[in-house]
C-alpha cells in the first residue's frame, strides 16, 4: 500500500467514527464526564457506595432516552486513595439532550443519593 493509500485508509477510518448527515456534515455529539470522590456514609464504605451509585445509575441509563450511552467506572481498590472514586461517562446527541438529562426525574433522584455520599465532584462537557 502506498503512503497516499495508507493515509486515505486511516482518514477513512477516522471519518467512519463520526456521525454524518446526508451532506457529509459532521454531527457533533456531547461527551459528559463526571467524577466523584465518595466517602464512607450511610453504613457503607466508600467502595460499597460506589457499587450502590453504579446500581442506581443503571436506572438513569434505562430511563433517560436522551442518554445515548452511559457507563459508570469505579477506581481500582489498589489505586491511590487521592483518586476520584467513580466516573460517569455519558454520550448525548446534542447539548439540548444533555440539558434534558440534567432535569430528568431519574437523574435528579440519582443526584439526591450521590449528594449524601460525595466529598468532591469534577465535570467536563465537550463536543466530539
Image (tube, rainbow, N blue to C red):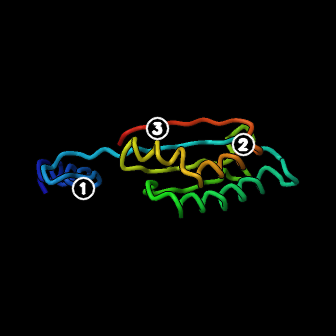
Task: Give the residue displayed 35% in from the left and 42% down from the top.
Answer: 128
Q: Secondary structure at mark 1?
A: helix
Image mark for residue 125: 3
Task: Give the residue displayed 65% in from the left and 51% down from the top.
Answer: 110
Judging by the rendered image, the residue that carries numbered circle 1 is 16
Judging by the rendered image, the residue that carries numbered circle 2 is 115
Tell me which numbered mark, 1 or 3, is placed earlier along the sequence: 1
Crowdedness near tag 3: few (<14), some (14–19) or many (≥20) residues, C-alpha within 10 Å: some
Tell me which numbered mark, 2 or 1, is placed earlier along the sequence: 1
Q: Secondary structure at mark 3?
A: strand
Crowdedness near tag 2: few (<14), some (14–19) or many (≥20) residues, C-alpha within 10 Å: few
Q: Are marks 1 and 3 in contact (CB under 8 Å)?
A: no
Alpha carbon distance from label 2 to label 3: 20 Å
Q: Which quadrant is home to the N terminus?
A: bottom left
Crowdedness near tag 1: few (<14), some (14–19) or many (≥20) residues, C-alpha within 10 Å: few
Q: Secondary structure at mark 2?
A: helix
Q: Position of residue 28 (x, y in %)?
A: 31, 44
Left or right, 34 with respect to 80, comes to left
Alpha carbon distance from label 2 to label 1: 39 Å
Q: How many marks?
A: 3
- Give whichever of 4, 69 is nearer the camera: 69
Amino acid at each position: 500500500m502506498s503512503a497516499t493509500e495508507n493515509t486515505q485508509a486511516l482518514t477513512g477510518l477516522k471519518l467512519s467514527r463520526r456521525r454524518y448527515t446526508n451532506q457529509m456534515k459532521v454531527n457533533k455529539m456531547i461527551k459528559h464526564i463526571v467524577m466523584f470522590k465518595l466517602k464512607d456514609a450511610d453504613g457503607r464504605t466508600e467502595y460499597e457506595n460506589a457499587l450502590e451509585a453504579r446500581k442506581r445509575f443503571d436506572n438513569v441509563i434505562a430511563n433517560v432516552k436522551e442518554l445515548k450511552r452511559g457507563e459508570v467506572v469505579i477506581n481500582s481498590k489498589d489505586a491511590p486513595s487521592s483518586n476520584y472514586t467513580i466516573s460517569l461517562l455519558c454520550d448525548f446527541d446534542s447539548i439540548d439532550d444533555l440539558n434534558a438529562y440534567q432535569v430528568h426525574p431519574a437523574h435528579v433522584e440519582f443526584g439526591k443519593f450521590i449528594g449524601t455520599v460525595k466529598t468532591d465532584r469534577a465535570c467536563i462537557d465537550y463536543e466530539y
